[in-house]
């Protein structure tokens, strides 16, 4: 039994040291690297306790850290847990109960706003309680099967008995701890990509159907290139340009593209908050703008944000997004399409930006989608496809944030 108390004590010590400056995953990796006494099983259990703690956000702040860790483990677990079985057997017997029953059992009442402080900022299109309480569950690992690789990937998973659920003909859901990369060639055969992110492909299909000939695409906030890979697989032969703000990001993208077999593309480092000299006079048929955002739709994967995010950042991101929009629309051909994407649930980063684009640039809204993942153990995203008018209308340059 002392081993389990040791896990609680270790998690408590880590939580006291962690300050939210870097991602929890990065902090834990450094911590365990500096403390060699922890074996792989120890690291897994202690990490799980830390993540469970943060899943409760700002709920149960008045109780000691050790007690909150135990309560979090109980509330976040849906099946029997070894630690609970040893330290709280009466809790472990009720671990499969619903959330309300668990709260009643513990006599510790909390509401959705105790977990997620920015409830009023969430879009009205989101089921707020469902979204907020979904943070108590760890999202799944999703694989997107690349064209022609569907059968071989499934055969490889079956051979080594890695469990999975078929979500669609090209999407599999796996437990988050799965080691699929040990048996599958990532990027060549399959791409690790959240289910909601994969669903952006539905809007790419619309662009493909509305276009003819080779499409000239600019993935302007490309990051690791996931949307570019999706565009290549959905649309086919494309004239691709990718950019991001740091050279290190582009370097990682190039490595990933090499693994995926993508050789024909242009890349550049660009700060889109201002004009891009490297793209002087260049225009594109299609601009993918998966813009920097709060990431609030993905905090099920980084629950430490529930404790360390500052509301001021919502306006900061919204301002940056408008600067990026102002820049990239100048490079969109008349009749071309803009795909605006965030992984945020905040209205200021989504519907308010749609209104801004329509008012200032007179783009036509083709299709808007809330890609809700909170009932699917997936991220929640927002995506809207616009088309630039063939005949230019004078823009209202007086529009301000």
Image (cartoon, rainbow, N blue to C red):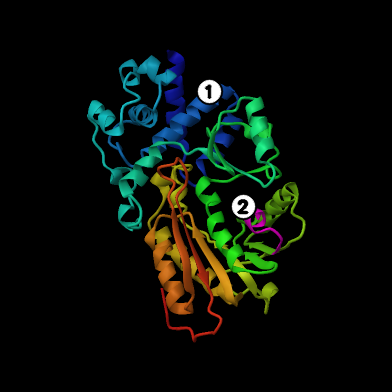
Label 1 vs label 2: CA separation?
A: 33 Å
| Image coords of residue 331 (percent x, y) | 61, 75
Q: Is residue 201 left or right of residue 242?
A: left
Residue at 48% across / 42% down in the picture?
301
| Image coords of residue 391 (percent x, y) | 54, 84
Q: In this view, does 180 lie above or below 286?
A: above
Magenta stretch: give its range.
Answer: 229-239
Mark 1 vs mark 2, foreground winner is: 2
Report which residue position mark 1 lands on: 42
Residue at 43% across / 50% down in the picture?
372
| Image coords of residue 112 (percent x, y) | 29, 44
SS for tag 2?
helix
* Crowd around label 1: few <14 · some 14–19 · many ≥20 (10 Å): some
- Image quarter (top left, top right, bottom left or bottom right) of the N terminus: top left
Residue 22 visible = no
Q: Is residue 294 above or below residue 156?
A: below
The residue nearer to you, when weighing 185 against 246, is 185
SS for tag 1?
helix
C-beta proximity under 8 Å, tags 1 and 2? no
Q: In this view, does 266 lie above or below 200?
A: below
- Image quarter (top left, top right, bottom left or bottom right) of the C terminus: bottom left
The residue nearer to you, when weighing 78 against 149, is 149
Report which residue position mark 2 lands on: 226
In the image as oriented, which residue stretches furthest toward the bottom?
Answer: 394
Residue at 33% across / 29% down in the picture?
71
In the image as oriented, which residue stretches furthest toward the top?
Answer: 1
Residue 79 visible = yes
Mostly what secondary structure, the magenta segment? Answer: helix
Q: In this view, does 8 lie above or below 354?
A: above
């Amino acid at each position: 039994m002392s081993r389990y108390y040791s896990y609680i004590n270790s998690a408590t010590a880590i939580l006291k040291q962690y300050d939210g400056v870097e991602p929890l995953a990065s902090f834990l990796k450094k911590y365990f690297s500096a403390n060699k006494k922890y074996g792989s099983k120890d690291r897994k259990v202690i990490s799980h306790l830390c993540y469970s703690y943060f899943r409760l956000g700002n709920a149960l702040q008045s109780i000691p850290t050790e007690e909150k860790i135990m309560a979090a483990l109980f509330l976040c677990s849906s099946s029997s847990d070894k630690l609970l079985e040893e330290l709280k057997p009466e809790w472990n017997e009720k671990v499969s109960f619903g959330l309300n029953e668990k709260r009643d059992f513990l006599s510790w009442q909390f509401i959705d706003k105790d977990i997620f402080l920015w409830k009023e900022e969430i879009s009205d299109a989101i089921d707020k309680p469902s979204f907020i309480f979904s943070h108590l569950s760890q999202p799944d690992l999703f694989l997107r099967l690349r064209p022609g690789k569907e059968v071989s990937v499934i055969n490889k998973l079956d051979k080594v008995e890695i469990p999975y659920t078929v979500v669609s003909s090209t999407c599999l859901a796996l437990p988050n701890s799965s080691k699929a990369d040990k048996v599958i060639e990532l990027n060549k055969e399959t791409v690790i990509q959240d289910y909601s992110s994969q669903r952006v492909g539905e809007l790419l299909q619309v662009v493909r159907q509305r276009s003819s000939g080779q499409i000239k695409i600019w993935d302007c906030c490309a990051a690791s290139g996931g949307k570019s890979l999706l565009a290549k697989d959905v649309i086919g032969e494309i004239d691709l340009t990718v950019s991001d703000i740091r050279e290190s990001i582009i370097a990682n993208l190039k490595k990933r593209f090499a693994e995926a077999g993508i050789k024909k593309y242009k890349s550049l480092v660009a700060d889109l908050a201002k004009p891009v000299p490297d793209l002087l006079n260049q225009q594109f048929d299609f601009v993918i703008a998966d813009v920097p955002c709060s990431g609030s739709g993905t905090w099920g994967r980084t629950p430490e944000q529930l404790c360390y995010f500052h509301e001021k950042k919502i306006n900061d991101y919204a301002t940056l997004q408008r600067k990026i929009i102002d820049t990239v629309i100048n490079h969109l051909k008349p009749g071309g399409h803009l795909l605006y994407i965030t992984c945020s649930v905040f209205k200021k980063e989504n519907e308010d930006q749609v209104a801004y684009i329509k008012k200032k640039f007179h783009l036509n809204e083709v299709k808007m989608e809330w890609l809700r993942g909170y009932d699917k153990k997936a991220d929640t995203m927002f995506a809207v496809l616009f088309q630039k008018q063939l005949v230019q209308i004078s823009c209202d340059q007086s529009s301000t944030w």
